[in-house]
Amino acid sequence: MALVPAAGLGTRFHEGGPKALVLLAGKPLLVHVLERLHASGRVTEAVVAYQPGSEEAFRAVLAAAPLPVRLVSGGVERRDSVVAALEASGAADDALVLVHDAARPLVDPIEVAAVVDAAATHGAAIAGHAMVDTVKRIKGGKVVETVPRIDLLSATTPQVFRAGLLRKAHAKAPEAIVTDDAELVERSGGSVAVVLTSRWNLKITYPEDLTWAEAWLARAGG
Ligand code: CTP
Ligand code: MG
């Protein structure tokens, strides 16, 4: 079961309108995502959290989805959208749920399968890649320290959990401001396995990210 938070406005990308419906190579980001999750062979249904007020636009786009999709109204923060999708999924506590951002349309289906398989063994697993830049902590425009990057991971999605673990993690810290679900599982004492992936699982955040994604798709032959 996939949970796809797609309710964001994309304020860093454009002014207004759901970013999940932006076209990449003529196809909405959300459709790219659902096709790639389906192609992993590990996902047979999905719940998509849509931007409140845009249900009809989402419904129209999802006519092209390769797998059965349920729509649920998203929340104010990403974590609220994930919880809404999780509850709508009705997933049993021991079932695996895969969370993947609608904003990551280039995810590799083989890597999706690898994260699901790691979570089947460990109970929780996330995708990510090594950092390439040197990382420095700064304050007031000045460098405070250089952080050894050998220990650092750029964490992405998919993130796969046993549904019960994810439910408990969200319930334990209902007010926490987080940008991914694994942080909540970490906070609640859960162990999270890592699957190293390609850096091409980029997130469409700024307009130029779409240019990178178009170039990658053109090179990969669609
Ligand atoms: N998301 C969501 N519900 C929210 C906020 C975000 O479902 N209330 C989803 C987005 O649709 C996206 C994913 O979470 O698929 C990652 O969020 P991000 O890339 O930050 O997208 P936006 O929040 O839409 O963009 P911005 O932060 O620039 O407004
Ligand atoms: Mg956001």
Image (cartoon, grey):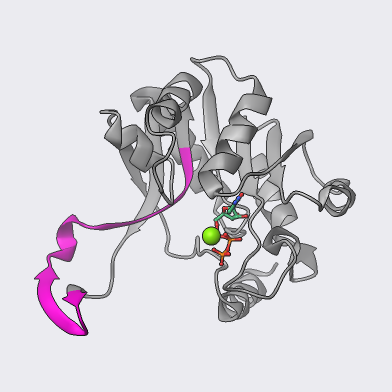
* Extent of the magenta region: 138-159
Q: Is residue 165 visible?
A: yes
Task: Please tell me whether residue 162 is drawn above or below residue 178 in the rendered image.
Answer: above
Count of numbered marks: 0
Q: Considering the image in quadrants, where does the C terminus appear?
A: bottom right
Residue situated in front as seen by the camera: 71 or 160? 71
Residue situated in front as seen by the camera: 148 or 67? 148
Residue 93 percent across, percent down from the top left: 50, 15
Q: Is residue 28 left or right of residue 218?
A: right
**Residue plotted at (69% across, 35% down):** 46
**Residue plotted at (21% across, 85% down):** 141
Residue situated in front as seen by the camera: 222 or 194? 194
Residue 211 percent across, percent down from the top left: 61, 80
Would residue 152 be counted in the magenta stretch? Answer: yes
Ligand 1 located in image quadrant: bottom right
Task: Please tell me whether residue 198 is drawn above or below residue 48 in the rendered image.
Answer: below
**Residue plotted at (30% across, 29% down):** 188
Would residue 42 be counted in the magenta stretch? Answer: no
Q: Is residue 42 visible?
A: no
Q: Determine which quarter of the picture holds residue 206.
A: bottom right
Residue 2 percent across, percent down from the top left: 62, 35
Residue farthest left in this picture: 145
**Residue plotted at (54% across, 53% down):** 108
Task: Please tell me whether residue 150 is drawn above or below residue 170 in the rendered image.
Answer: below
Would you say the magenta stretch is mainly helix, strand or loop? strand
Q: Considering the image in quadrants, where does the N terminus appear?
A: top right
Q: Determine which quarter of the picture holds residue 66.
A: top right
Residue farthest front in this picture: 175
Q: Is residue 119 left or right of residue 27?
A: left
